[in-house]
Image: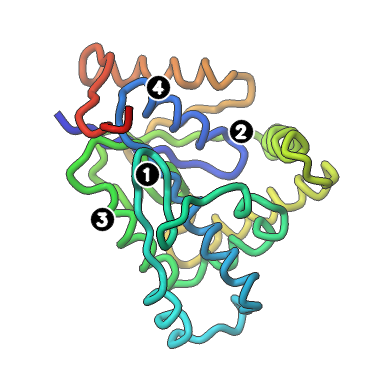
Amino acid sequence: MKIRIAIDGPAGTGKSTVAKKIAEKLGIDYLDTGAMYRAIAKIFLDRKLNPDEISEKTLEELFKEIKFDLKCEKLYLNGKPLGDEIRNPEVGKVVSKVASLKIVREKLTDIQKRLSENRSIVVEGRDIGTVVLPNAELKIFLTASATERAKRRFKELISKGLKISFQEVLDEILQRDKLDSSREVAPLKPAEDSIIINTDNLTIEQVVEKIFEILNSKFGRLVSINETNNCQ
């Protein structure tokens, strides 16, 4: 049995951590699509490309140089694993604009679909249930207030030694919400058949527990699928 689980939601809802834990418990693959958009945004910054002015031709040429792979739950760009370099505030400020570009979304959506083929996998992002995996066996949409999400992201960034104020984090969250939900291509919204979970007053463990309750009620008790994870 192959199970594809789509986890969507705005920044700071705990999608990445929740998705990782579910994948670990089931022994299946995990794909962070947000990391892919951040990686492209980092390339924009490194090459001083302006998302408001870049041409379709330049984007087409750029993607000829780009190859993503998913190996042992790690995402690789051109043979190198993605790390914290894509998580800095500078990337966060431009990623939504980069992600709103039609060619960027089309190219990465195609790659995400390819990476999710013929395997059980947990995929998280902002358009997984609506665009990337519209036929996923389970779709979850996580929500939380902007303030709560900013608190979580601020704590995470500070723990990594980044110097940033809470207000900067909150402003970034609000700006990303606005851009993600209003873009023309694949806007952030729950799929019609997704299950919405508000995480404001829940720990990560409680969210994972809720999702496993849903999985067990839908598919019977799942301990491990462990069909593709050969990384031990």
Res 191 label: 1
Among the two numbered marks 2 and 4 on one chain, the one whose residue lies closer to the N terminus = 2
- Given residues 26 and 142, the one toward you in this image is 26
Would residue 150 be found to the left or right of residue 209 on screen? Answer: right
Instruction: Tell me the element at label 2.
Output: loop
Q: Let me know if residue 177 appears in the view.
A: no
- Whole-angstrom CA distance, mark 4 to mark 1, is 16 Å
In the depicted structure, whether residue 175 falls above or below residue 94: above
| Residue hosting label 2 | 144
- Where is residue 152 shown, x and y percent of the image? 69, 33
- Whole-angstrom CA distance, mark 2 to mark 1, is 17 Å
| Residue hosting label 4 | 211
- Tag nearer the camera, 2 or 4: 4
Q: Quadrant of residue 156?
A: top right
Q: Quadrant of residue 28?
A: top left
Res 110 label: none
- Whole-angstrom CA distance, mark 3 to mark 4, is 25 Å
- Tag nearer the camera, 3 or 2: 3
Query: Which residue lies most toward the left here?
Result: 1
Among the two numbered marks 1 and 3 on one chain, the one whose residue lies closer to the N terminus = 3
Task: Tell me what residue is drawn at x 65 percent, y 59 percent.
Answer: 91
Task: Tell me what residue is drawn at x 45 percent, y 84 percent.
Answer: 56
Q: Let me know if residue 146 appears in the view.
A: yes
Among the two numbered marks 3 and 4 on one chain, the one whose residue lies closer to the N terminus = 3
Among the two numbered marks 2 and 1 on one chain, the one whose residue lies closer to the N terminus = 2
Amino acid type at image mark 3? Arg
Res 114 label: 3
Instruction: Tell me the element at label 4.
Output: helix
- Where is residue 87 shown, x and y percent of the image? 63, 50
